[in-house]
Amino acid sequence: MFLPRACDVRLLLLLAVTLHLCSAAPPLSPNSAGSDCSCYHPAGNEKALFLHHQFFDFRSLGNETFASNLTVPATIDDSQDGGIEPLTSPFFDKGLFGDYFTPASWSKNASELAPVFMVNSHQNVYLSKQRLRVTSSNSKRLMDSPIPGRDTSDSPVHLTLRTNRLSSFQSTSDLQTAETAYMHASIRIRARVAGSPGACAGMFTYLTDDQESDIEILTRDDHSTIRATNQPGLDAQGQVIPDASTPLTISKSGSSATGSWTDWNEYQLNWLPGQSEWLINGVSKLNKTYGVPTQPSNFQIKMWSDGSSWPGNMTVGGLATLDIEWIDMVYNVSGDASGAACQKTCTIDNIANNPIPQRSSGKVHTAGMWSISGLVLGTLWASILLF
């Protein structure tokens, strides 16, 4: 099952027609069990109400035709500095995941502060069952890359973003949402990171460098540390702003023991009016009022390095990956009415194990503090199931 949710009827029909015309695409059908939810809220916060819900479960793709012959693409080599490689799977085409997230192929020239030429490639975004294999007790420094070629692992499918260092550039990966008008959201991602020092795994809302809220994992950091950042991180004089970025310690799920970003963890960013909150494995780690975005934004996932002081400068031949099992998003979009009544509010607390939103109360709530699109208020909300 692959569940992009929160679509109105017109979008559902459009997607159905698109998928019918695309032979590589499985059909869509409505998931009626959750279709009458009018609002959603994240765990423990029934006042944070959102109209839209999308759940992308990559684990569920194992039975798809294109997933039965998964191939780990070869790593980019020195000759591939143009970012012109094709998509690695029909899954990333329009009509499927590509309607929601688009792999990027832009590049960034080297500079004094970021001395490594950076090139995004479609070849670094792929579906896989493998992961980096540890060849040393120091899993941060000596890792083997996934073996290019047919992927015969019996592990669940996951999405992988990759970066590797060449002699003249850093090959990187970037996924960006087609939606650019998110206005507050709760975003959860189950992910793991592995590889050489000098990479940054970023999951963040973005409009400009001053309108950005980040979950970041730096492979130069200790395995138990991630970064929670609201931009800008530097003042006009180029000095670090102390309130911008905060290191957080990973705690294992259901335990006070320290965890590692090389293992699967659930990372959550709550972007609310005037406040950002970061959670790890369901535990709130930080609330921040500095730099909370105030403008409509998109959402991006990146695995990158440019040799700057933030990610570090990866050694030539180094490689790192970001693996993602699922992405769960509830959000509002900008531009229309507020104060709408939510006749049925649904929780997404257990969405990873039961991908149908569960009714959280019989009360009628008012979403007065959230930006709600008037366009969707008069439509029938439906969840859609990709199988």
Image (tube, rainbow, N blue to C red):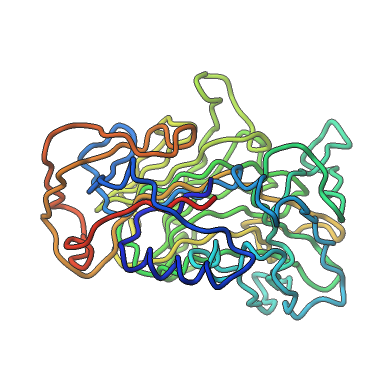
* Left or right of 124 in this view: 25: left
Q: Nearer the viewer, residue 284 or 157?
A: 157
> Which residue is drawn at the image coordinates 66% and 34% (left, top)?
263
* Left or right of 294 in this view: 61: right
> Which residue is drawn at the image coordinates 47% and 49% (left, top)?
3
Picture quadrant where residue 302 is located: bottom right
* Left or right of 228 in this view: 219: right
Whether residue 320 can be seen here:
yes
Picture quadrant where residue 163 is located: bottom right
User: Where does the image place residue 347, in percent across and percent down from the top left?
Assistant: 31, 36
Whether residue 307 can be seen here:
no
Asked if residue 212 is positioned above or below residue 282 in the image, the reply reads below
User: Where does the image place residue 103, in percent across and percent down from the top left?
Assistant: 61, 68
Q: Nearer the viewer, residue 59 or 23?
A: 23
> Which residue is drawn at the image coordinates 35% and 50% (left, top)?
330
User: Where does the image place residue 384, in percent across and percent down from the top left?
Assistant: 41, 53
Q: Nearer the viewer, residue 317 or 76?
A: 76
Q: How many numbered marks appear?
A: 0
